[in-house]
Amino acid sequence: MQQGMEYAGLLEVPFVFASNGDGFIFRDLTNPTQLETEIRLEDFPPPQQLWEKYCAWKGYKEEHLPIITQDYYDDGSGKSPRYYQLQAINKTVEAVAAGQNRALLVMATGTGKTYTAFQIIWRLWKAKAKKRILFLADRNILVDQTKTNDFQPFGTAMTKITGRKVDPAFEVHLALYQALTGPEEEQKAYKQVDPNFFDLIIIDECHRGSASEDSAWREILEYFSSAIQVGLTATPKETDEVSNIEYFGAPIYTYSLKEGIEDGFLAPYKVVRVDIDVDVQGWRPTKGQTDKNGEVIEDRIYNQKDFDRTMVIDERTELVAQTITNYLKRTDPMAKTIVFCNDIDHADRMRRALVNLNPEQVKKNDKYVMKITGDDDIGKDQLDNFINPKKKYPVIATTSELMTTGVDAKTCKLVVLDQGIQSMTKFKQIIGRGTRIDDRYGKLWFTILDFKKATELFADERFDGTPERVKVTTPEQFEDEENLDDIIDGVDDVVDAGNPFGDEDIDPDSIQDPEATNGEGSGSSPESTGSADDWDDENRVRKFHVNGVPVKALAERVQYYDSDGKLVTESFKDYTRKTMVKQFSSLDDFTKRWNESDRKQAIIDELAEAGILWEALEDEVGKDMDPFDMICHVVYDQPALTRKERADNVKKRNYFTKYGDTAQQVLNNLLDKYADEGVQEIENIHVLKVKPFDEMGRPLEIIKKGFGGKPQYLEAVHDLEMAIYESA
């Protein structure tokens, strides 16, 4: 019964039936004098009676029922809305039926806001309660995805507004804000129809400006003020200037990121924090030092907030790119990855660094790494391929602002943060790029690789709480948490060059990505109210560019959610122990599995998939050990043996005497390869193509002469591995 009560609470239904196989308990919240009653099977209340009691409990009026009872869209595939989508749809339809003219739905990224919006529109449209509908978005990709995917059942009744022309012949209109309005009167296409033309407006990603009183987009909503307006967002924006809640009212339904992860609808994630020495300790130029362009560098200490905004250190960019590359090589080089950079210039430099570090992958396909930013048409043309699970390339996308919201990248497994993020709204949107699950492609969780301490926002109580209105009314009340964080962290007050206007609402198509902060870049779009050329030299933020600075990673830490939903930070040692306990019950269990495996690489890959970062673990352990020994030492407190020590132990046992001369030479060389590079190297038969084996002949000749054939060679390698891992 208690479990049923929990489910009933989630669905907000007043009835629960529980059975022990013999009798039944009927819990009925509509009967407060007798909440639970024991009944027989033949005493079950008929559906009509339950419906009448339910309508009374919900407060439905007779005139509301034709709208409330309108069926959902059913494509015949058996797909139906998830429980939280049902709640969001029903609550919105009920609110509209009751005459509520503003509504706000808060649903975490990846939980199906657009599908929810479709079902809301479908039911109201089919019930003839709303006849002309406008779906507003702020990015072209959002509109196109909506039209071709979730909204496809509207067919010929639907159109996308283009060319600043509103065609009244259609019933469902999809539009960009920018297609309906602009700074010039002739650009205000929405005035082509009467203010009462639309009777329902759905505003997607409504946190991105529509609620701001002075926003150009707000004029559309005010012009059609007689229409029911429903805002959709994962992150309501609550500042002194912009309030979704003040405009739309309190959310009629909220489904959080934490709930989505706990329910299994969103991918859980782990966080890897990388601290770089210059970020932590700062960097100061020598007196009179000039940068790569001959500019004298201002003499002060540059810190994390400066890097890639006012100060570029090439070695730092290369270290970040190397860390990303190492992670992908250890896990999955083809895992879709988004790297968030400070501005377009930073995204371009990061793309170049990643290209140079991945020559093998780039040789296979030159689109392995792409810069996808608002100024780059070639990059933007690859956005659909990046989010398409069936397309292998691009694999890595470097970006700044363009991909922070509305990009449905279901198979994204790695989100890299090398961008200073102060806004909780933006942080949630960026994290949402990885939260979608795709079972077909093995996307069940993802990793956040954080170089800028952005994930400290996880600790902020606002991360997964109910948003509250923030009003600054007196100096005494000016206690903004982000300002306090800056004081506590001892961070200089540096203007965010990527967003010099703070939280003002800016047309996202005019400034999709921050340009290079020295004033260079793509320029603004024609719809922008200004351009980089309008800034004089005094107003431009100077960006120095240096190289030759020694840079290194100080530490790496893993963070993950525990069973209580709290983010836990621990060393790689502790994290590895916990991960291994889930995979193997004991040392014997692990050793048995390792020895029985024909390919040790398979186990190494399996553990990497489970979240173990081998290179980071090796750095922390501080010894050049085999993966087997790292696990035995760190997890099971066994003596630490290096690969060289294991190889020497095999030689001491005169292991090779049972083989002929050629086989002994091959196995001796394989053992040396193991000591130098690891077990993965000797399991790859192509090792026979490189030195010193190439001096002995071609691989087939070596195998035939030394072992008689390939099966015998593979058996000898397996036996060698058994000898390597035999107890010393």
Image: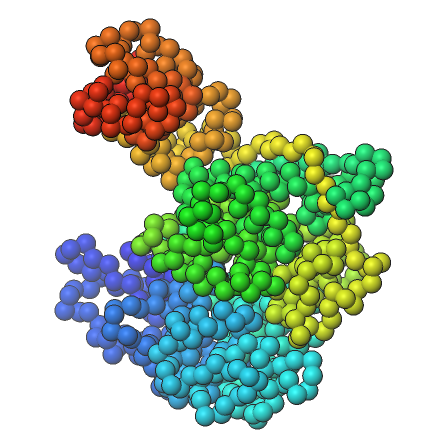
Name the foreground residue: 74 vs 647.
Answer: 647
387 on left or right of 342: left
The answer to whether residue 363 is above or below residue 171 is above
Residue depicted at x 51% and y 26%: 620
The answer to whether residue 209 is above or below residue 390 is below
- Count of numbered circles on the image: 0
Whether residue 473 appears in this view of the structure is yes
Q: Which scheme is used to colour this image of the protein?
A: rainbow
Within the image, what quadrant is residue 390 found in?
bottom left
Whether residue 271 appears in this view of the structure is no
Residue 3 on image: x %, y %:
31, 54
Residue depicted at x 47% and y 52%: 366
Residue depicted at x 66% and y 75%: 527
Name the foreground residue: 271 vs 609.
Answer: 609
The answer to whether residue 134 is above or below residue 412 is below
Residue depicted at x 69% and y 63%: 503
249 on left or right of 505: left
Within the image, what quadrant is residue 294 found in?
top right
Name the foreground residue: 577 vs 467.
Answer: 577
Give the quadrant of the C terminus.
top left
Residue 446 on image: x %, y %:
44, 47
Residue 409 on image: x %, y %:
44, 58
Residue 57 on image: x %, y %:
38, 74
The answer to whether residue 512 is above or below residue 55 is above
Give the quadrant of the N terminus.
bottom left
